[in-house]
Image (spheres, rainbow, N blue to C red):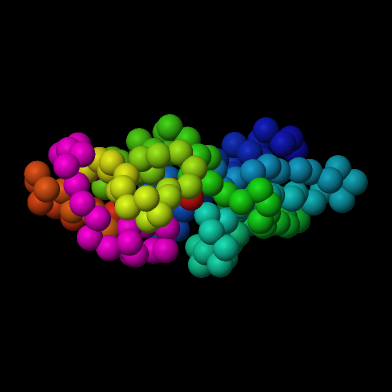
């Protein structure tokens, strides 16, 4: 039992709301530890935001993935500090989001466009145009907004910066 083997297993766990990205791609997976004396595996994850309903399912998926590989003594620990940020999404994760039809965060860290009134430049995942507009600040989940491309006229989700 090694930490590298545990991490490798965990890198296959997908987000239940966006099944093309893994918890590693999103930066949710923070660390794993093994208590050699007890054999307990501790997995540390950070929610994309406080109260994210997907975290319960992610915990179940983590335990299931490890149990399938023979690790029965598993504890999943949710870390609230430091707070998760979209900066933790990997380049591979950003590409997977775009390919899936969700525009990844266009900026780093917190999006303050609501304060400045200047909307972020958001690329359409369909035609790659940046000639887009926000339709709704609230999308299918709390971490997404709804945009529409002014060129291809297709609506799409945008993974909000935070």
The dominant secondary structure in magenta is loop
| Residue 68 seen from this side | no
Asked if residue 126 is among those painted magenta in the image, a careful observer would answer yes
Query: In the shown orientation, is residue 137 left or right of residue 143?
Result: left
Residue depicted at 52% across the width and 54% down the height: 48
- Please tell me which residue is depicted at 60% across the width and 59% down the height of the picture: 59
* Residue nearest the viewer, comparing 8 with 27: 27
Residue ID at (66%, 56%):
80
Residue 113 vs residue 54: left or right? left
In screen coordinates, is 79 left or right of 21?
right
Left or right placement of residue 47 versus residue 134 in this view: right
Residue 5: percent from left, percent from top? 66, 35
- Residue 143 placed where, x, y %? 42, 58
Picture layout, residue 113 above or below residue 95: below
Q: Position of residue 156 (x, y in %)?
A: 23, 53
State yes or no: residue 71 in magenta. Answer: no
Residue furthest to the front in view is 116
Tell me which corner region of the image, top left, top right, bottom left or bottom right, holds residue 55.
Answer: bottom right
Q: Position of residue 135 (x, y in %)?
A: 22, 60
Report the residue at 43% width, 32% height from top: 91
**Could you tell me which quadrant the N terminus lies in?**
top right
**First to last magenta residue range:** 125-145
Q: Using the image as rendered, state which of residue 68 and residue 80 is in the foreground.
A: 80
Q: Is residue 80 visible?
A: yes
The quadrant holding residue 120 is: top left
Q: Nearer the viewer, residue 140 or 63?
A: 140
**Count of numbered circles in the view:** 0
């Amino acid at each position: 039992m090694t930490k590298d083997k545990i991490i490798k297993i965990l890198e296959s766990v997908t987000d239940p709301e966006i099944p093309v990205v893994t918890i590693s791609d999103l930066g949710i997976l923070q660390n794993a530890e093994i208590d050699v004396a007890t054999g307990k595996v501790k997995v540390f994850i950070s929610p994309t935001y406080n109260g994210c309903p997907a975290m319960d399912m992610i915990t179940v998926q983590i335990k299931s993935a490890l149990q399938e590989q023979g690790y029965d003594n598993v504890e999943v620990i949710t870390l609230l500090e430091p707070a998760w940020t979209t900066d933790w999404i990997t380049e591979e994760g950003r590409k997977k989001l775009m390919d899936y039809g969700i525009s990844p965060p266009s900026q780093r860290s917190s999006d303050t466009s609501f304060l400045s009134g200047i909307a972020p430049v958001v690329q359409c995942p369909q035609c790659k145009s940046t000639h887009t507009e926000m339709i709704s600040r609230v999308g299918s989940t709390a971490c997404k907004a709804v945009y529409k491309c002014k060129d291809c006229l297709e609506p799409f989700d945008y993974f909000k910066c935070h």
